Image (spheres, coloured by chain):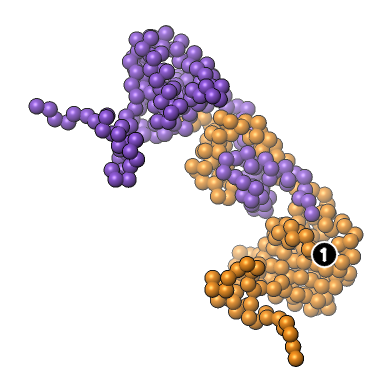
Chain colours: A orange, B purple
Amino acid sequence: MQLSPSLTTLIEALRCQPGIGPKSAQRIAFHLLERDRKGGTQLGNALIKAMTAIGHCQSCRTFAEQPQCEICLSPKRQDSGILCVVESPTDLLAIEQTGQYKGLYFVLMGHLSPIDGIGPSEIGLDILESKLQQGGINEVILATNPTVEGETTAHYIAQLCYRYKVDASRIAHGIPVGGELDLLDGMTLMHAFSGRRVVSQN
Amino acid sequence: MQLSPSLTTLIEALRCQPGIGPKSAQRIAFHLLERDRKGGTQLGNALIKAMTAIGHCQSCRTFAEQPQCEICLSPKRQDSGILCVVESPTDLLAIEQTGQYKGLYFVLMGHLSPIDGIGPSEIGLDILESKLQQGGINEVILATNPTVEGETTAHYIAQLCYRYKVDASRIAHGIPVGGELDLLDGMTLMHAFSGRRVVSQN
């Protein structure tokens, strides 16, 4: 027996979500049809709306429905003179949730990866360069991921900052708060040692 | 910082899927926006289509886009004179996937549960009764789940069959193929003993 065409299409379409395999997709489809048709329709409308309405902020490249995002439009943030470079909007969100950072952002939407054909212009470094050129930025905080690609990207942007005489700093790598020394990998421990800070000096 | 309204709505709507919490919903939303907008739009359309186009088969109550499903329309199955009663369309699908059963189905879309206000008419037993009354069915196979509610439902339908002089049988409960005796629960073992079959007799 074949499932009805709309149901087959729905199960297949549900699999575009990360972490959803064929069994989960079938379970979700039957759940929505049996118990939550209203929710299913709302999800459908929300998806179509979001996929068309959400674009990128012209200034920082994060997701936004307006030409510029809320953060870039804030005069307080513009006056801070600090720009934090992150790889994705989720990184931006994580930093925002700490509530401590009050500067601007620049979202690369990826990282340099020449092997995949991702060069400086694909991650918007031309836009970042013109920002540095314009002035008004005193410090660039490099908050890319501590992976090979993330480090390469950070290094590339640091050179760009040097060219335009803007300070560049890299977020600290070390022991996470609450972490235990004996459970940490060697690389992190090494970073924690090389990045040590003086607490008292004679 | 607040996420854009469409994005907030999308993340909230994604949570109608079973097994998707706030973190997974956020991950799915960002994944679709960053990497698979086409897939997201297709999923949106598939959901809206499925939620409106898929109804219930008038004859067996399973999901169908036509007034009657493929199985109910098959003359071979109609001639079989066997009707298998299951709780949900997924149970029907599991039985169909064995490829062995060639009769008709009746999908209850639930089970008797007076405490939740689910009585005989809520699970379509009035439709089943008129089917039994019409004739043409020689045997009803009760394939509800081996839970308290499933057993109660099976018992109720068995009485209905008795009234209309139709044979009723319950699927066997016992040791699953490949299962090991020492790992089974006592209830299943008890069922396996009480349901034993003669293999040689003097």
The residue shown at (18%, 29%) is B198
- Viewer can see residue A14: yes
Image vertical order of residue A9 relative to residue B35, above or below: above
Image vertical order of residue A140 relative to residue A55, above or below: below
Query: Secondary structure beneath disc 1?
Result: loop
Q: Chain of mark 1?
A: A
Image vertical order of residue A123 relative to residue A42, above or below: below
The residue shown at (78%, 60%) is A99
The residue shown at (52%, 38%) is A27
The residue shown at (68%, 45%) is B11
Foreground of the two, B77 or B116: B116
Residue A184 occupies quadrant: bottom right
Foreground of the two, A124 or B178: B178
Foreground of the two, B149 or B200: B149
For the C terminus of chain A, which image quadrant?
bottom right
A134 horizontally vs B2: left or right: right
- Residue A58 on image: x %, y %: 81, 57
- Residue B97 on image: x %, y %: 39, 34
Residue A83 occupies quadrant: bottom right
- Residue B179 on image: x %, y %: 31, 43
- Residue B140 on image: x %, y %: 37, 19
A138 horizontally vs B9: left or right: right
Residue at numbered disc 1: A103
- The amino acid at mark 1 is Gly
